[in-house]
Amino acid sequence: MYWLRKGLRTGAVSMAGAVACTALVACGSDGSDPGRRTAGSGKAAKKSPGAQEDGTAAVRSAYDTTAEEQTARMKLTTRTSAQGRSVSAEGQGVIDLAEGDSEMTLTAGGQMTEQRVVDGVLYQKPPEEQRAKVPGKKPWIKIDLRKAAQRAGGGSSQVNDPAESAGFAKGVTDKDVRKIGTEQVGGTSTTRYRVTIDVDKLAGTGDRAKADQLKKQLGPTLPMDVWLDDDGRIRRQQMDMRVTAPGGAESGGPRKAQVRTVIEYSDFGAELDVEPPAAGRTADMTDKATEQR
């Protein structure tokens, strides 16, 4: 799914949340609504064909429109549920919408992790009590997200990537988009749309093997909700998936997980100046992070 547009690469952030929760899987949902509902929410309002076409066009252009703002503050929430357990992570920071770099803090299990994403590489500074597990007891760990995506079969880490969502969103038709209603997101009036994505479209034209792999992981369709403001910019995105992750005999075979990832954008144009930590202070954990257990 790389790279129609480099921007809005929150797939990196979503994977970071999964890493912090020790689960490299994609997203899922219980269908509840994280936003405050206003008139028309919860039901698909009756609309004219022209209104439906307008909504579809808005969804198709939303990622490019948002990326034109260059930067934004970002709030991330992920919840991973598997084998009767649930783990949540929350993050706040600033993202470069044009290039995908970001700087934020993640909180999971009551512990805070500093995080940076620079040129498709994730850097995390775990809590001090966890650093004894890092090779060389380095303060930072490093995960190359592109390599991780390739080793995962090109699926879960890429599906969360709204840079690629820009590509498949442009392929949606009127039957794929449903207007849910109007809602307030961070004090801003928005229109919420539910988009049903054919998973075949995620793999790209002619890549049957990748399409089959994605469908094994995600099922035939991918539900995604987006909340657009009056300027057509994304204020919130929710990815809903049930994922089957491969597992060996020792782990009891394939593992099924549900994860909800919700990302909110605000304060467009926020200042961001992020650099990778010094190489001597980082330990490359890409191989470890992508091991199949």
Image (cartoon, rainbow, N blue to C red):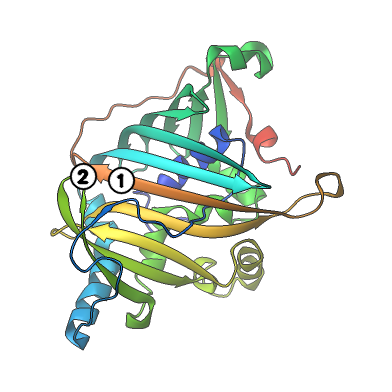
174 left or right, relative to 214? left
Q: Is residue 293 left or right of residue 46?
A: right
Residue that appears at 47% across and 23% down = 113
Q: Helix or strand or loop: what does disc 1 sit on? A: strand
Q: CA distance from mark 1 to mark 2?
A: 9 Å
Task: Give the class, few, some or many, for how many residues have Cα within 10 Å of label 2's Cα (few <14, many ≥20).
Answer: some
Callout 1 amino acid: Glu
Please state if 164 lies on the left or on the right of 281 as rendered. Answer: left
Out of 243 and 159, give the one closest to the viewer: 243
**Foreground pick, 188 / 55:** 188
Q: Quadrant of residue 153?
A: bottom right
In the image, residue 14 above or below residue 200:
above
- Name which quarter of the figure residue 21 lies in: top right
Q: Position of residue 9 (x, y in %)?
A: 40, 47
Asked if residue 207 is positioned above or below residue 28 in the image, the reply reads: below
Q: Look at 37% across and 42% down and name the residue there.
A: 100
Residue 101: numbered disc = none
Could you tell me if residue 110 is visible in this image?
Answer: yes
Q: On residue 186, which mark appears?
A: 2
In primary-sequence order, the first of circles 1 and 2 is: 2
Q: Position of residue 272 (x, y in %)?
A: 26, 30
Q: Position of residue 187 (x, y in %)?
A: 16, 46
Q: Are marks 1 and 2 in contact (CB under 8 Å)?
A: yes
* x, y percent for residue 36: 25, 52
The residue where tag 1 is placed is 264
The amino acid type, in three-letter code, at marker 2 is: Gly
| Position of 20 relative to 223 (above/below) | above
Rendered-image quadrant of the C terminus: top right
Determine the residue positioned at 34% across, 43% down.
Answer: 99
Task: Examine the image and state in which quarter residue 136 appears.
Answer: top right
